[in-house]
Image (cartoon, rainbow, N blue to C red):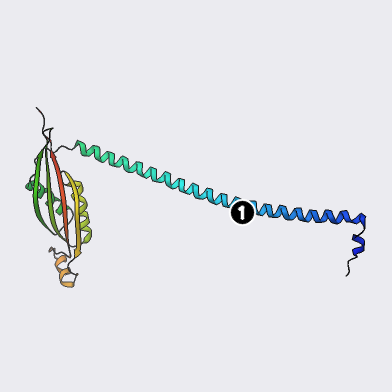
Amino acid sequence: MTINWQLWKKPENGGVLISLTCFIVLCLFLFIRTLVHFEITQTEMANTSTKTKIFSNQIKSVEDYEKLQQQESQKFSTFKKKKWDKPLTQELLNQSLYAIQKQTNVEFLFIQPKTGVNKTSADQSNTQKTTLTLIVKVLRDQSFFNFLQKLESELPGVVAIKHFELKRVRELNSQLAQKVSQGEKISLFEGTIELEIEYAQFVEKK
């Protein structure tokens, strides 16, 4: 098949060729422009989706913070209403500690008190700060952490855990398992807890 170029070289057919060429160029231009616009649109949609996700996470973080703040406010409100009308003595601490020991299935508890400091402030309230070291022996590690949590929530005064450490001192064998089944107290873990208690005894003004 041969193309008759002489036919297209005629003046009356030259306009058709130019029009066809312009049309093809225009179509290519529109296709490239549409493709570029599509890519830009996809990028903008991805950026919008990312911004929306970040904004949603920020809203959730604010909501979680507000809920936590409300919970802490409720706890602090309850804390302020708590009246400590008994002096902080070693006997009171021991009673509280041994009560927590029974609640958390702690097998052995040894209390090593340190010096306490008494101060009298201008509002006639007696503030006492006491440091304790506790040695705890437990069968399960979970009992240790339950005990640790209850120290902060149930001991009188404001409790600050300064340091704690838990280590496994022996492995469970058939002999120890038999002792446990017979109700005998044994321990597989030993932990050390250093805590500080700040206690304010409020004195009613007359």
Give the camera-side residue of 123 and 202.
123
Q: Which residue is mark 1?
A: 39
Picture mark count = 1
- 126 relative position to 5: left or right: left
Q: Residue at x 18, y 47 (%)?
A: 159
Q: In which quadrant of the rendered view does residue 180 lie? A: bottom left
Residue 106: x and y, percent?
16, 57
Residue 37 position (above or below residue 189):
above
Kind of residue at disc 1:
Glu
Q: Quadrant of the C terminus?
A: top left
Give the camera-side residue of 26 and 91.
26
Give the camera-side residue of 19 and 149.
19
Q: Residue at x 64, y 51 (%)?
A: 37
- 17 relative position to 177: left or right: right
Is residue 47 among the parts visible in the rendering? yes
Residue 165: x and y, percent?
19, 59
Instruction: Point out the residue furthest to the top here.
Output: 206
Q: Residue at x 8, y 49 (%)?
A: 115
Q: Residues within 10 Å of mark 1 (few under 14, many from 20)?
A: few
Residue 68: x and y, percent?
32, 43
Give the camera-side residue of 39 and 148.
39
Residue 175 position (above or below residue 26):
below
Q: In which quadrant of the rendered view does residue 3 lie? A: bottom right
Q: Secondary structure at mark 1?
A: helix
- 68 relative position to 178: left or right: right
Q: Quadrant of the N terminus?
A: bottom right
Is residue 147 among the parts visible in the rendering? no
